[in-house]
Image: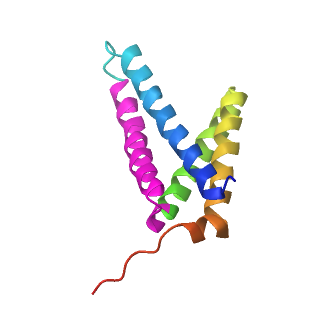
C-alpha cells in the first residue's frame, strides 16, 4: 500500500534527479558562454537543497517539512511565470506537482510518519 510519505519521497527523489539532469544539460550547452554560469549557480543551489532534503526525507526526519514546503512554493512561483511566459505545459507541471507535494507534506499521515527529533540532555 502506498502511503503519503512514500509517494512524497518518490516525487522528491524524481525532482532531485530532474534538477541534476537540468544542471548537466545547462553545463553541456553553455560551456563557452560566460553569462550563463550565474544561472547554473542558481540552479545548483536548488540541486543541493533538493539533494539534502531528499536524504532527510528518506531518513524520515521531521525538520525536512518546512524547507520542502518553502522550496515547493518557490517552484510554484516559477511555474506560474512559465505559464505567463508562453510555456504552459512545463509551467503547469511546476504548479501542480509542487502543490501536491505541499498537500502531502501538510497531511497528518505524512507528519505522523516522520520521526520527531530526539530530546537528549
The region drawn magenta spans 36-64
Percent of width and height locating residue 60: 47, 61
Instruction: Based on the picture, tell me whether residue 76 belongs to the magenta stretch.
Output: no
Task: Give the residue displayed 59% in from the left and 44% down from the top.
Answer: 11
Query: Relative to 32, is 61 on the left or the right?
Result: right
Task: Give the residue displayed 40% in from the left and 24% down from the top.
Answer: 24
Task: Give the residue displayed 46% in from the left and 53% down from the top.
Answer: 58
Task: Give the farthest residue toward the front.
Answer: 1
Percent of width and height locating residue 86: 69, 26
Quarter that holds the C terminus = bottom left
Q: Is residue 99 above or below residue 93?
A: below
**Residue nearest the viewer, comparing 119 with 31:** 119
Q: Is residue 93 above or below residue 68?
A: above
Q: Is residue 33 above or below residue 14?
A: above
Q: Does the magenta stretch mainly form a helix, a strand or a loop?
A: helix
Q: Quadrant of residue 27?
A: top left
Percent of width and height locating residue 16: 48, 39
**Residue nearest the viewer, comparing 27 with 5:** 5
Query: Relative to 17, is 76 on the left or the right?
Result: right
Instruction: Based on the picture, tell me whether residue 52 belongs to the magenta stretch.
Output: yes
Q: Quadrant of residue 92?
A: top right
Task: Give the residue displayed 44% in from the left and 20% down from the top.
Answer: 25
Amino acid at each position: 500500500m502506498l502511503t503519503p510519505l512514500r509517494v512524497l519521497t518518490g516525487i522528491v527523489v524524481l525532482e532531485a534527479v530532474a534538477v541534476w539532469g537540468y544542471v548537466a544539460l545547462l553545463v553541456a550547452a553553455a560551456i563557452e558562454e560566460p553569462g550563463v554560469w550565474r544561472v547554473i549557480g542558481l540552479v545548483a543551489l536548488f540541486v543541493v537543497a533538493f539533494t539534502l532534503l531528499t536524504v532527510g526525507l528518506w531518513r524520515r526526519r521531521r525538520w525536512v517539512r518546512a524547507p520542502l514546503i518553502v522550496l515547493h512554493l518557490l517552484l510554484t512561483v516559477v511555474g506560474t511565470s512559465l505559464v505567463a511566459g508562453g510555456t504552459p505545459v512545463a509551467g503547469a507541471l511546476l504548479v501542480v506537482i509542487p502543490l501536491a507535494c505541499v498537500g502531502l507534506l501538510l497531511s497528518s499521515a505524512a507528519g505522523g510518519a516522520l520521526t520527531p527529533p530526539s530530546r537528549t540532555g
